[in-house]
Amino acid sequence: MHDVIFVNRDFLAAGLLATLQISAISIVCGTLIGAVVALLRYLRVPFAARFCALYVGLIQGAPLLVVLLFCYFALPALFGYKTTAYWATVLSFSVFIGAYLAEDIRAGLQSVSPKLTQAALACGLTMPQVLRLVVLPIGVRSVIPPIISQYVRLIKFTSVASIISVQELTGNALLVNARVFEPATILSFVAIVYLIVCQAVSLFGRWLNARFAVRT
Amino acid sequence: MNYSFDWSALWVHRDLIISGFVTTVELASISLVLATVLGIVIGTCGAVGSRGLRVLAIGWVELIRSVPLLIHMYIWYMALAVLRLPGFACAVLALSIYSSAYVTEIVRAGIENLPAGQAKAALASGLTQFQTLRLVIYPQVLRRILPSLASVFSQLIKDSSLASVIAVADITYEAGALDGMTFRTFEVYAMTLVLYLVLVSIVNQLLGALLSSSMRSSRPSPRELRDA
């Protein structure tokens, strides 16, 4: 019964690799977007902060699948460019997770006591220095758990990319299933792989939090 | 950008859009109720049950949460095809079980964060275990966890879009069909995004109103109870 998995191990491993790759790129890009948006809103930069609030509100009201289809079908149609399923996936996942990360990071920045920033300013640090040396390190370290849970969410979400025929873990598993039709074996295998990956990332997050969280 | 907009195609096919929207609302509301009930039951077991029950509840949450919703859908639809469930039932099962794991976590944390004296005092004054839960624990916990529940509910509404993959004719599914018929790609998907946004906003507003009305109710707030 488990022959299916063994025979197709290379194909499934390639899928897992693609899943991890998409997750990694989207996590990096999404975190950058989230950090910039959070900073702009934290500093209340005129106009930009409004725009960022609109972006966060729009994305938080939208399902990932529709954002994905929007990036794959609607945006290229609108602006007349060609894209591949892979890059549409990375774009939509980064933009999607960026909005959620922005809210988490902003919550962290706002949890930094104003007394601390005032003290830092009084010591003669400039505003960029205060941000870099005081607000960001303390703020981000206080929101490690929600950030990690967003990452885990993103890894699970990568399965949605199979819908626009990206060959990641779920997509490859469905292809194998289409050939041999053993859905019970294949789907439970895929579920276990996601379980292991997600638990590993959560564990890593718990370690990060234990190591770096700000103790008050 | 030389895309010519044509929104009239949406109006021509409004019956499709409406039926998709209704399906989404049905799917989300049935799953929402089931997920809440399941989450409260398992979450209560995880918080006040025996040691074995607690371990089971935590294991259940970790198992369900670590598997993508799409895989849940496929498991009900393809792996358990022997059950011959229609797509809609599969989507309801997958959505409610998946979301119930999140509700479970919230309920469990809510009960555990309640001061232990509450339950002890209730039991000491002669209430049964079930009465303690119903009259003392739940009213306080539910009010406290309402904001977290609201975010799980809006997540659930958005997650329901994945049902389109197992041929449930929800709004996302109809968007794909409309796109195929009219080729008005941008208009169709922009409209879908707006519809979800409206749905999520309505639910958030409703829960927000519920929250503020429960805060204003004559009963003492959890803070007053704790300080008393």
Image (cartoon, rainbow, N blue to C red):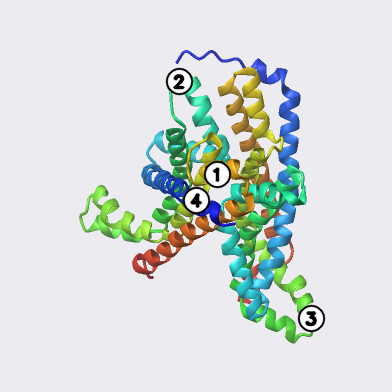
Residue sitting nearer the eye, B16 or A108: B16
Q: CA distance from mark 4 to mark 1?
A: 10 Å
Residue sitting nearer the eye, A30 or B124: A30
Residue B118 sits above or below residue B72 on the image = below
Q: Amino acid at mark 2?
A: Phe
Q: Is residue A6 left or right of residue B128?
A: left
User: Horizontal and vertical percent for residue B186?
Assistant: 55, 23
Q: Residues within 10 Å of mark 1 (few under 14, many from 20)?
A: some
Kindly state the secondary structure of the residue where label 2 is placed: helix
Q: Is residue B118 visible?
A: yes
Kindly state the secondary structure of the residue where label 3 is placed: loop
Q: Is residue B109 visible?
A: no
User: Horizontal and vertical percent for residue B118?
Assistant: 67, 78
Callout in the foreground (2, 1): 1
Q: Which residue is mark 1?
A: A176
Image mark for residue A7: 4
